[in-house]
Amino acid sequence: MVAIEQLTSRRPALVWHKEATLEAADLVIIPGGFSFGDYLRCGALAGRSPIMNALLDHAARGGAVLGICNGFQILTEMAMVPGVLIRNAGLKFTCRNVDLQVCETVASPFSSGLAIQKKLRIPVAHNEGNYFAEPNELEKLNSEGQIIFRYVNGDSFGLPNPNGAADNIAGVLSKNGRVLGMMPHPERAMLNLHGGTDGAHFLLKSLEALLS
Amino acid sequence: MTSELETMNFNNAALMGLSRSEWDLVNKRLGRVPNLCELGIFSAMWSEHCSYKSSKKWLKTLPTDGPQVIEGPGENAGAVDIGGGLAAIFKIESHNHPSFIEPYQGAATGVGGILRDVFTMGARPIALLNALRFGQADHAKTRHLVSGVVSGIGGYGNCIGIPTVGGEVNFHKSYNGNILVNAMAVGLANKDRIFRSAATGPGNPVIYVGAKTGRDGIHGATMASTEFSEETESKRPTVQVGDPFSGKLLMEACLELMAQGSVLSIQDMGAAGLTSSSVEMASKGGLGMEIDLDLVPAREKNMSAYELMLSESQERMLMVLKPSATETARAVFDKWDLDFMPIGQVTKTGRLILLKDGVKACDIPINPLVDDAPEYNRPHVDAPVRAQLASTDIADSRPISQTLKLMLGHVDLASRRWIYEQYDSQVMADTIAGPGGDAALIRVHNSNRGIAICTDCTPRYVEADPKTGGAQAVAEAYRNISAIGATPLAITNNLNFGNPEKPEIMTQLIDSVLGMGDAARKLDTPVVSGNVSLYNETDGQAIQPCPVIGMIGVIEDVEKAIGNGFTSAGHEIFVVGQKDDKNDGWLGASIYQQHFGDSKIYAPPPINLAAEKAHGSFVRQQVLKGNIDSAHDISDGGLVVAVAEMAIKSSFGAEIEVPNLGQLNGWAFGEDQARFLVSAANSSALVAAAKKSGIEITRIGKVSNTRELKFGSTDAISIEELVATYENCIPSLMTKKN
């Protein structure tokens, strides 16, 4: 919320999970967190909150949705983006900066302002960020341009990515490019004081595309 | 079970940890023999954990006042003025015994408990830290305990969404059977809207909110007040179970209700649960309380009065509300799906009256529970006198670079990344400096003001000389806060010791409190909150004494703060607080001695508090003036380890000039206090300022562009080689197969 205010000088509306209707919105963001404590499968309960029918309607009308971290997990639970997120390969929570590479995608407000192959440094903080989809599904995601971010440069322990994600996937789009789920937290890379502004760059470009 | 109303005898009391004289006093104050519930309440309130009976006499000697202090010890947490109309509210607390029995839940509930202490005061928590001590790295249980405690701390903090931004971890064989898990929380509140716990207004409703009460943690405070033995495993049911999601709901509901102005007083149900919360609220208000235990929301059937009063189920609060506000308050808790139950009222009687099944299960005067809690002046002895160790007593012909590599690859000094990456250190996006710095730095939301926080203690110094060790913990924290450019404000302490009934342990406690008090007075950092954890022994073996200091400081503009990694090649490197001609150093009780010396206990480096204050203030001023680009406190491992840490944190190397006389192990690895390592682009301004202030400063080299550390002209090592050993140590320990 602070991040969006910083970039647009507009205050986003907060919507309580027990509500049933969504007002018309340029973008709905499902932020990170531990909805219902993640005691059951991550995002499973939140994906069935009363508000979620309205979210499905919003997406069906072509509305844009961004799910970050737990928000991504919720989107996969609702099948609004393909695949699932399972326990990190190391079976541990991990919080650190990671390098992402922007991939070529289907037409999408989330990628239209980003240069293909551009590197972004944005932190991750999660316990279940290990992206999984069947091999034929992965192939389809590739060919349809639904993979937007891949982890690159590996990590300090010599692993290719922080969580074991298939094909190094850090973020995926819906088929129509209007819904994005991503594990990294762009709202934590908004200022030089945060150690970088790549998150602000990504969000700003997305908002420019959505608000134009 | 026989009727709860049956009277007890001394055997029952002894099983609950009361001494004969304490049992006699209970009977005298009550004018009759107590029943089970009443005895349980007395034993919990008079336990070491709740009454501080062994330490109180000495805690009173600590400085607790200052212009910055809003709330000193006695409330749920301490509060200090940080400017801008805000108060920082903070405290550290131990969860040692539960964490040894059940590491994940023990550590998780430690975090949950300290967070409740902070938001009970009306503060929104902004940061968590910890201080951990584990047994030897190769001890059979250590890996299990490290992995459980770390994931428990992360499990609670990450889920509730408060960043874990710093802490310290060490390993020593004395903790093999008794680990230490101390958690610290810091919150922010409007300084005119701090909530306290004294009950007010007879007739006002007493409300129970939060999670339901179960049979977990019954008599945990008493368990925390005895030594460990093999039988402790059977006490697993006394460990509470954490529920961070309920904790989050409770926090949001309480803060929302407090903002409405209907809360008169509020108290967290921590150790000794409903007992200590009701007794403390009534006692502080000079009033009484009447509670109908049949109204307490219970998770299990047929819980007795004793169980309901002594349960330590988590995520619960007790509040006194304005009578007119009950229904609006209920609506807030309904919104957050939490229990909200008026269970009684404040009375004028000065008595705690509990009803169960319509019958009085307890009727006791409140004053004796608090005021007559025993205070002991336990026997103690003189602290042992330790011999000094000369650097030449340890022969060392290794090049500095090779000694350094050995030390950095050992668990004492190796990278803590494996641990801190399991903590979400950034959630809420106000973390400017997280784990790995001298102090963590958190921005006050929507402002440029920052709060600097650190935890420190060097148990091997405290063991060698408790007074020096107690002072050193404060001095090191003072340096850590100063190194990033912040002004130290106040401290919270967590005194972890063995059995105070042993005179030599009591000496450790007394002397380290005296040393700590002395340092806190001279460095203007009063003690505003704290916790004492005694009986940290297993089968008669006491831990290395560990009086942990948590310190906070403030910086007006976070943009001016600096880190502890070099920032540019060509910058010159100085030691602040060290004379030009120094070519030796203090190796007694150092990490170097642990590795390369004998196993005797030698005198630790002395503390000069005037020098600490002068050097810390100088560094802080120079950081704020922009004359210093990076700074690092010189502590464990000495000068050369500090150089290596600053290089590892950066993308640069360093060329260090070494003295050309004498054996250099003391110069390189001595742990002389009151020193900082700094790098500066504008070195002439820094040197001139030092001269003007009469501060000793020595140039020792410069930052280089090659990823290499050079000591003199012939000894060099690549940073990559150091990083490999530094980063691999803990991960490889944690994945080793037995």
Image (cartoon, rainbow, N blue to C red):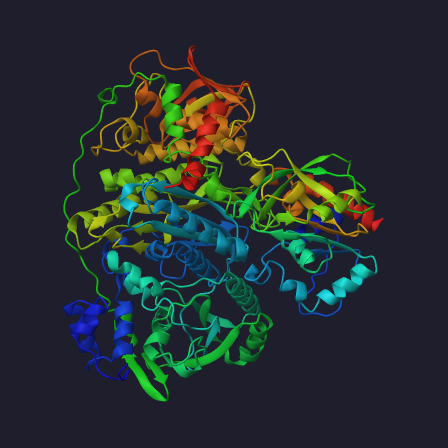
Which of the pair A89/B62 is nearer the observer? A89
* Residue B6 placement, left or right of A1: left
x then y, percent, for residue B737:
40, 41
Identify the residue shown where x is 54% and y is 61%: A39
Which residue is located at x 38 percent, y 20 percent?
A: B402
Decide if residue A172 is on the left or right side of residue B297: right
Q: Is residue B617 above or below residue B162?
A: above
Quarter containing the C terminus of chain B? top left
Is any part of residue B535 visible from this angle? yes
Q: Residue furthest front?
A: A136
Q: Is residue B590 above or below residue B335?
A: above
> Is residue B523 shown to the viewer in this render?
no
Which quadrant of the view contains residue B336? Answer: bottom right
> Residue placed at 81% from the left, 62% from the top?
A24
Q: Quadrant of the N terminus of chain B?
A: bottom left
Residue sitting at the far bottom: B358
Question: In the image, residue B163 lies at what x, y percent?
Answer: 52, 50
